[in-house]
Amino acid sequence: MSCCPGTRDLNRLPMIDISNIHKTYITGNNKLHVLKGINLKIEAGEMISVMGASGSGKSTLLNILGILDNHDHGEYLLNGIKIEHLNERKAAQLRNKYLGFVFQSFNLVSFKNAAENVALPLYYQNVKRKKRNAIAMEYLDRMGLKEWAHHLPNELSGGQKQRVAIARALIGKPKVILADEPTGALDSVTSQEVMDILTEINKNENITMLIVTHELDISRRTQKTIRITDGMITEIVKNEKIVMNVMS
Ligand code: ADP
Ligand code: MG
């Protein structure tokens, strides 16, 4: 129902709804309790950042949200679907349907060119080569990289590599993009350009976005910043839009 613009539709499910999530890594005799009861609701279309010191559990949380790792306790609902005890086939199915990933180190396949990298998710969905290459070209074009389609990753700049990775994340038409320090390997100008692209995607396509970052000027460009300290959420800040910032 969309009866009342500006009011929250109480019937709408959050895109991500986690409660009391715990995660402990066990290596040999060592137990490391990394996530200590995380509660978080993210509505469809929100753009949120996660900040916290190195080792505080940000990537662990993102991996659980990305169904790349399991939580030990607590509940995770992805668009209302309970994520628990999934076999790899079901997990992959949900990842394909709902999630796109962007990483600090781009994670491109080094011996495949830009177009082939973008097309990769479609290969796993058994889309024929000609069709998937044509679709990949559309997405590269949207990223302003059409001319670079046949270049290998090591022939691209950091910013170009991240745009290829974003195109690859988008080609599966995800509902959510999970980005783990997407600007961590980029200079500040290129970082802002990558944020421009992510913001535009969030606005135009209503794709929910969760961005882990170390940088305040990146987190400020999201609607809300969640701070994780030692495996717990310790602060949620709403980022007001700064229209002008003049020192007087
Ligand atoms: P962040 O992304 O905030 O830097 P991580 O979630 O990567 O933190 O890691 C949190 C803690 O868990 C760190 O101490 C890290 O060394 C540890 N850790 C991460 N992944 C594993 C793993 N697969 N096995 C054991 N320990 C891990
Ligand atoms: Mg990390």
Image: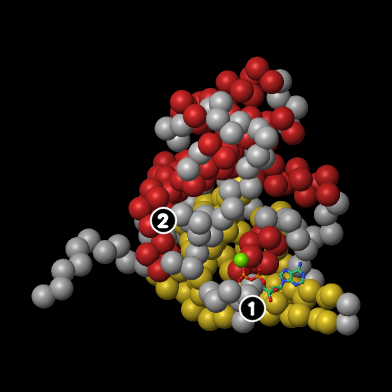
- Residue kind at label 1, given as amino acid type: Gly
Q: Residue at x 63, y 42 (%)?
A: 108
For the residue pair 91 and 54, the one nearer the viewer reads as 54
Color scheme of the displayed model:
secondary structure
Q: Position of residue 227 (x, y in %)?
A: 51, 75
Q: Position of residue 42 (x, y in %)?
A: 54, 61
Look at discs 1 and 2 and give the one toward the viewer: 2
Q: For label 2, count other residues whose C-alpha is less than 10 Å away and answer few (under 14), some (14-19) or many (20+).
A: few
Lower position in the chain sequence, tag 1 or tag 2: 2
Q: Residue at x 38, y 57 (%)?
A: 188
For the residue pair 157 and 122, the one nearer the viewer reads as 157
The circle on residue 231 is 1
Q: Residue at x 83, y 49 (%)?
A: 88
Rendered image quadrant of residue 130: top right
Left/right of residue 181 with respect to residue 80 in the rendered view = left
Whether 58 is drawn above or below 78: the answer is below
Distance from disc 1 to disc 2, alpha carbons, whole Å, reads 29 Å
Q: For label 1, count other residues whose C-alpha is less than 10 Å away and answer few (under 14), some (14-19) or many (20+).
A: many
Q: Secondary structure at mark 2?
A: loop
Q: Secondary structure at mark 1?
A: loop
Q: Residue at x 67, y 40 (%)?
A: 109
Q: Position of residue 182 (x, y in %)?
A: 52, 55
Name, please, the residue furthest toward the top. Answer: 130
For the residue pair 187 and 201, the one nearer the viewer reads as 187
Give the total number of marks visible in the rendering.
2
Q: Position of residue 118 (x, y in %)?
A: 60, 34
Which quadrant of the picture is home to ligand 2? bottom right
- Residue kind at label 2, given as amino acid type: Asp
Query: In the image, is the residue at mark 1 within 8 Å of ligand 1 by its beta carbon?
Result: yes
Residue at image mark 2: 187
Residue 170 seen anywhere in this rendered image of the structure: no
Name, please, the residue furthest toward the left. Answer: 248
